[in-house]
Image (tube, rainbow, N blue to C red):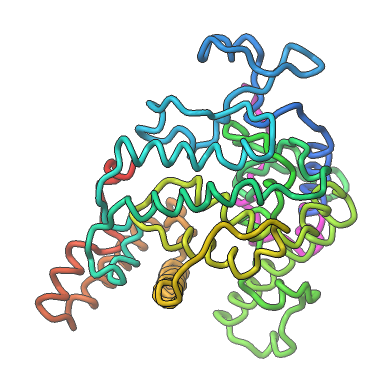
Amino acid sequence: MEFVDGTVLSDIWFDLEVHDIESVVRQLVELEARMMSASFPAGGSLYYSQDVEKLDGKLGIPLEDDWFCVGPDVGVRMWIGKRSQLDVDRGPYTSVESALVGPANKELEYLQRFGRPLLPFDRMKREHYQYQEQSPSNHIDNLHRYLRTAPSLVPQDPSLHQFRIRHPDLQSSNVIVSRTTSGDLQLLSLLDWQHASIRPTCLHAGIPQRLQNYADPLSHHMVPPSLPDDFHAMDDVAQSHAKELYRRRLVHYHYVRNTEACNPVHHAALADPAWTLRARLFAHAGDRWDGETTALKAALMDATTTWGTLSTDPCPLAFEEEDVRRTWELEAKLESSDETMEQCLAVMGCGSQGWVPNERYEVVKALCRKMKEDGLAGATEEERAEIEAHWIFDDMDERPYS
């Protein structure tokens, strides 16, 4: 392991000028372009050849330099918890279809061996399931539906079949930078490559989760970002919110524009009209089952209504009208819960996963306690019992979900 002497980008992010943000995003895209310009003979993860033999006694698929090879996918979702005990195909994958079905088959095997009814992991959503444990059988049914669609998810464009590598979690806390003698911000290194996967280009398409701002209509439609006209008339709190929104829009906008200019491989994948639906299906089918299946089912229903963007083959799925109505009604409630959770985290100054800077830890704990006390104060006896049992910021035993 090598030491990198520099500054973590997240430590200085909120002090950066606009030209610094634009420069860093451009350098990140340029680095992605260099990485994605290399193609691999198969999908999985990159290994020293001798290490793959030690892992399971099998040979990986060698590169031109046989010091390295492609072996099993080391992505977290393939190994988390009891999934590490499964004898399933984690790669190397030699076709797009095998890469599409590998994670879903892994989760299917896990549920058939270890699955049991669970409350939804996301406690904010439990009320929409009447605080009842959910059977894994519904998710098993939806995984089988996904597997029936998989052959049709392979894109027609053969250039999108090429296997390529990409950083799995591109965000400011994984970026090391420094200032040059002229004062420019220079990208030195990216951290946390250990779970990087080699996938078909079509499955790498997308703006990194921590950089995208699709929920904002202006970002979605690629409107050049700017501060509000009345910015200087705002109070300090309003200015802070406006600047943060401006930063998010800047990052999204310049990531897309620089990808178009510097990374033709990724831009071609983003130009495929099916990429967003394919990505949703692939993600939800391979992710850890967390006690609910609505996201996967909703994506499958979307596939039936927009099947022509995916394939010229007949659609292998059909849903009853009442099932569709109930699913979308529930999906709308779950999306509302997500928005409420985001607002709670924003009020407390937490990151998307609840992380806070060390210096704010005690302050945020106090805010959590106050929020719970306020909720309990106006609740009925039944509601108080539900709050105590399912409070979103209390500790919980996560072992049943692994």
Q: Position of residue 196 (x, y in %)?
A: 62, 35
In the rendered view, tell whether residue 50 sits above or below residue 6. above
* Position in image of residue 61 (x %, y %): 69, 18
| Left or right, 291 with reference to 144 | left
Q: Quadrant of residue 94?
A: top right
Q: Nearer the viewer, residue 219 or 325?
A: 325
The magenta stretch spans residue 193: no
Left or right, residue 109 beside residue 384? right
| Residue at x 82% of width, y 54% of height | 267
What residue is shown at x 87% (from left), y 49% (from top)?
264
Instruction: Please give the count of numbered marks on the rendered protein.
Output: 0
Q: Residue at x 13, y 69 (%)?
A: 385
Residue 113 lies, with reference to residue 202, above or below; the image says above
Q: Give coordinates of residue 309: x percent, y percent.
A: 72, 63
Q: Quadrant of residue 302?
A: bottom right
Q: Position of residue 277 (x, y in %)?
A: 63, 60
Q: Say which of 353 and 374 sits in front.
A: 353
The magenta span reads 1-24
- Examine the rendering and report whether any part of residue 102 can be seen: yes
Depth order, front residue of 160/26: 160
